[in-house]
Amino acid sequence: MSSALATPTRPVVDPLRFSASDVTGLHTLDFDGVDGHRLTSDVAMSVAEMMQLPTNVPYAIRDDESARMLAEDVALGSQINPGARLVVIPKVHLGSL
């Protein structure tokens, strides 16, 4: 059975080169030589920390060119093209009232 939501398997690009900004566009950093085998969730937290964003919330990454949210538990290097423009977005979870 095939799922339309499944992430296709692509070769991992390693090392990675990309730029990342926060969702407000106030912070933008360029990255080169990033381990493409790192999980997207791990890279998201590292980028947020380098931007001095609050580290008590989890972050996700969106590929700016495709406007696609990246799978957190997949290697970043298998989801983006070299030179990608990424956006780091805080993950908001609604609590119960």
Image (cartoon, helix red, strand yellow):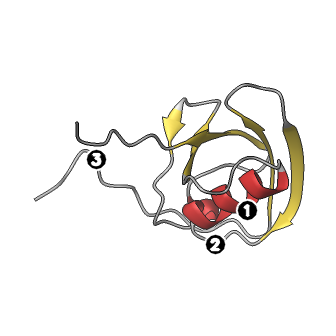
Q: Are marks 3 and 1 in contact (CB under 8 Å)?
A: no
Q: Nearer the viewer, mark 2 or mark 3?
A: 2
Q: Give the residue type that dot 2 points to.
A: Arg
Q: Secondary structure at mark 3?
A: loop
75 over 26 or under it: above or below: below
Q: In the displayed structure, does residue 62 sit left or right of residue 18?
A: left
Which of the two labelled residues, at mark 1 and mark 2, occupies the earlier sequence position?
A: 2
Q: Secondary structure at mark 2?
A: loop
Q: Residues within 10 Å of mark 1 (few under 14, many from 20)?
A: some
Q: Are marks 1 and 2 in contact (CB under 8 Å)?
A: no
Mark number for residue 5? 3
Mark number for residue 46? 1
Q: Which residue is mark 2?
A: 38
Q: Give the residue type that dot 1 points to.
A: Ser
- For residue 76, what is the image quadrant? bottom right
- Image location of residue 18, percent across then percent down: 80, 49
- Of the pair 94 and 61, the residue shown nearer to us: 94
Image quadrant occupied by the N terminus: bottom left
Disc 1 and disc 2: Cα gap in Å? 11 Å
Count numbered badges in the picture.
3
- Image location of residue 64, percent across then percent down: 64, 31
